[in-house]
Amino acid sequence: MLFIALRQMLVRGKQTLTTLSGIVLGTAAFIIISGVLLGFRGYLIDQLINADCHVRISPRQEIIQANSMDDLFPNENVFWLSPPSGKRGSTHLNQASLWYERLDLDPEVEAYSPQVSGRIFLYSGSNQEAGKIIGIIPSRQILITPLADYITEGSVESLAAGNRLILGDGLSKLLGLGLNKTVWITAGLQERTPFRISGIFRSGNKALDDSIAYGLLSEVQQLTGQSGMITDIAVRLKDVNRSILKAEEWRGLGEDKVLSWQEANSSFFAIFKLQDAIRYSMTAAILVVAGFGIYNILNVIINQKKREIAILRSIGFRPKEVLMIFLMQGMILGVVGGIIGLIVGFLVCLRIESLPFSNPLFSAGAGSMVVSFAPAIYFQAFLQSMVATLIASWIPARSAGKLSPIEIIRGE
């Protein structure tokens, strides 16, 4: 049966080659698109996980609406001339010490770091930049994020000397300042306060590097008028995959806002879902075209080889065996096309990985493309090509198996 199937395919070599090319293209396209998209996704997720905490605890703030005041006027019909608006809530954690106790006792917590943050203006001569200052305890912060690894000049520990700041690489360039230079800072209506730049960091995230400054917790509290207050607690878990579940658990312990890193970056994950839909749709379209090619080839072969089918049936071939002959042709195309597609896709991905690439979202400088070579991608690509060819070849093969010698002779 295999010999007969191969011979019939080789008779129509051009059509067979065209259909084979479609399968190769579909398989290779899926590998290339998936490799690039999943490679960038993995890089981005790694940046998100490492650049920030796994879970962040902060004060809850609520948008005020017309019905937000119903509890103050029970059983009364209130008509607002000007409906209440804005937001309500605290700017700092009211029970920070209680959270410290909970986190100290939780075996899933690897480390946590209290923080205080605020909006500031930075001045250097005629240069003025808006930014965000984060007050940290250096010894705790380095356990949450790889801030120490991001330092390109100076050190994190230098903050302990007092009146020191660590600036993002982009922010320092915007101000035209370097290490050991003085920058003037103001928060709100307060007077300008001088700080010495004791460190410069580059996280690779352009948005952070162009706007963030780190200072000592106690000094930032005083600078922003939040003495003794904590605005955030950054938490690192032993298992990052438990972030969502842990955030849900902690949300039930109080009114404070608790967000996992996945929830804080939900917009990225929405984009990832859209990317998945696009890559599967593109590959499906290519494989559908290749499937129609297989269907047409087998239909043509069956119509042209009816006499041979009649002879095969006459010498004892059963309908199932005739079906298998034509089904084999589709499966051979699927296997050969799938394997060639895997090789082509792999080689193209290797080439893409060596291409220089600079992402405007990240300031880590030009690098190379990040491509994923996960085995699951290649397994899915081969499986899709096999399923597409199996479905496309089953219908004509089944009709060939139903043909009887008498029907063929009558038709002739």
Image (tube, rainbow, N blue to C red):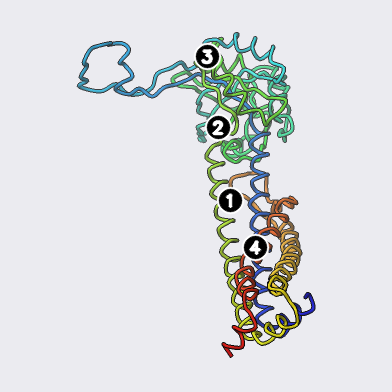
Classify the position of the N terminus by image quarter.
bottom right
Which comes before the other along the chain, label 1 or label 2?
2
User: Which numbered circle lies on residue 29?
Assistant: 4
Cα separation, mark 3 vs mark 4, equals: 50 Å
Residue at (68, 24) in percent of width and height = 236
Cα separation, mark 3 vs mark 2, equals: 19 Å
> Residue 257 vs residue 44: left or right?
left
> Residue 299 vs residue 7: left or right?
left
Q: Which residue is mark 3?
A: 254
Residue at (72, 50) in percent of width and height = 376
Which comes before the other along the chain, label 4 or label 1?
4
Q: Which residue is mark 1?
A: 276
Task: Between residue 99 and residue 327, name the one nearer to us.
Answer: 327
Which comes before the other along the chain, label 2 or label 4?
4
Type of the residue with mark 1: Asp
Residue 59 at x, y = what percent?
A: 50, 18
The answer to which image quadrant residue 175 occupies is top right
